[in-house]
Every structure is written in C-alpha cells, then in structure tokens.
Image: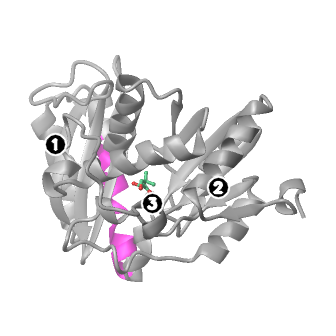
Amino acid sequence: MRKNEKNFKIIRSPLALQRLSKKILAQGKSIGLVPTMGALHKGHISLVKKSAKSNDVTIVSVFVNPVQFGANEDFAKYPRRLQTDAKLCAESGADIIFAPSSKDMYPAPLQTYVRSAIENMYCGAYRPGHFTGVLSVVAKLFNIALPSNAYFGEKDFQQLHVIRKMAYDLNFPVKVIGAKTIREKSGLAMSSRNEYMSCEERVAASSIYAGMQEAKKMYKQGVNSVAKLKKIISEKIEEAGGKIQYIEMANKNDLVPVKTKISKAAVILLACYFGKTRLIDCDFLYYPR
Ligand code: PAF
C-alpha cells in the first residue's frame, strides 16, 4: 500500500472540501486539482501522477456535469464507476476524490455562467452551450478546491484553451497545466467514450491518428495549404468508415482559425464519428517546421 492510500478520502460536500482546502493552504501546502468526469483511463492517471509529483496534495474531482451535455447527448449513459476510480486514484498518488452529486453542485439552477468568446467555434459549433457548462463547472471547482495548479489533457485542446483563458481573464490564482494526449498502441487517443465502440470501430478509429500523422509528414515536406492537409486527414478517416464532423486548423496560441496557409505554430482540431461514437482529437504543426 502506498503512503497516501491509507489516508485517501472521498469527499462529497463542496463546503467540506472548501474548508479542508483552506486548512491545507494555511499549512503552506500546495494543491493540485485534476478535474474529471470519472471512468478514469491512463490519460487521467497521467494527470494525477503529474499533479502528485509537483503538489503536496492532489484532489481529483469526479463529476458528470449535467450542464455541459446537450439534450440528445450521452449524459445518462456516461460511464460511472466511482469505487474503481477511487482505487486507481489512490494507487496513483492522489489524496482526495471530490465526488459531489448534482444536487450538491447545483442546489438551485444557475443564474450565473462563465462564457467564452469562442464557445460557438470548433466543437462548440456542434455542441451549443457545452463550453459554457464546462467553464461554469470548472470555475466552481476552482473556488471549491482552491488549487494552485490544475491539470487538463491536450486531447480536448479547445477546452484546455478556454479554461486557460478563463483563469487568465478572470484572475483565478490557478496555473492551468496541459498534458500530452495519451494514446492506445494503435494511436487512438484515450477517452472514456472509447468504450462505447465495438472492437472493429476501435480499430478503424486509429485512422484519426494515422491521418494526422500523414498530414504532419506532408507539412514537414513543405505542404502548408490548409485545404490539402485537411483532405489528407479526411480521406484517411473516411476510408476507414468514419464520418467527419469537422476538421479545422487554428493558431496554437489563440485558436484563431487558419483558413489558407500555415505560417505559425498551429493545431489540427477535429471531431468525427465511428458508428454512433463521437471522437475528438488534435495534433500540432510546429513552426518553423
Ligand atoms: O474534460 C472533462 O472531463 C470535463 O469537461 C471537465 C473538465 C471535468 C469539466 O466537467
């Protein structure tokens, strides 16, 4: 048993966690927060380990946030397995799981939300209200857990960007840290939603990474036309039976869309379907190449 497995706590009440966090900070200790919706996989665990390395106390929040799901999305079927998650967290160096109920987090309907100016772009164009739901819950989590550092995966790069901007624009005293996407051997990005797919769909979905790798290779060889790079990726995905929702290129730093030619560090952002499962992914085109 690791040192902190013995003292590992599951806390449900926002007020109880906020009180505990205040005590921890008063002792001069740092808090790392890893916000999640549970069904933890190796990607989440890498964030927990990163936090445990650099903070005195690591809190993992597990909350399937109803406010960020659209009416026809997968809120009801989103996998929930708190006991397994708790065990994984304790083994990986976390100290506390914060697992509130919806009633704990939203005792009354919100009248106050945090909105991003790019909430209707990229993924947001297809998930109206999603990023408002994400930012509003993350703002609450920051105020409840009082972290010095908060950890998010790069796979959802738009999410990472809007959260980082929120912390900067609204002066949250939190450093938002992005971590590399963890992939299966096939290249498929780890996601709690991968388990919705059949084995065949999972194999086919590795074409997302393959497509991005091919585009990166062509970019390195001198192709900087956005249209050409997008075509390379969409062809790979469609050949494997995937359905593209969108593929866009944006400046890495501010997520301003790049329409014609890559001329500074850029990010490929995409969403597509394999069967009924919506997957997102991203990769980077560095500059100079
Ligand atoms: O990425 C997620 O799991 C969620 O969007 C987050 C950041 C935990 C907010 O609910």
Answer with left or right where residue 273 lies relative to residue 40: left
How far apart marks 2 and 3 lie (CA) works out to: 13 Å
- Distance from Cα at disc 1 to Cα at disc 2: 37 Å
SS state under label 1: loop
Q: Earlier in the sequence, mark 1 or mark 3?
A: 3
Q: Is residue 28 above or below residue 123?
A: above
- Please, what secondary structure does the residue beneath circle 2 have? helix
Label 1 – label 3 distance at C-alpha? 27 Å
- In reply to whether residue 202 is colored magenta, the answer given is yes
- Mark 1: which amino acid? Met
Q: Amino acid at mark 2?
A: Ala
- The first of marks 2 and 3 along the sequence is 2
- On whether residue 214 falls in the magenta region, the answer is yes
Task: Sort mark 1 into few (<14), some (14-19) or many (20+) by Cα contacts within 10 Å.
Answer: some
Q: Which residue is mark 3?
A: 105
Image coords of residue 210 (percent x, y): 35, 54
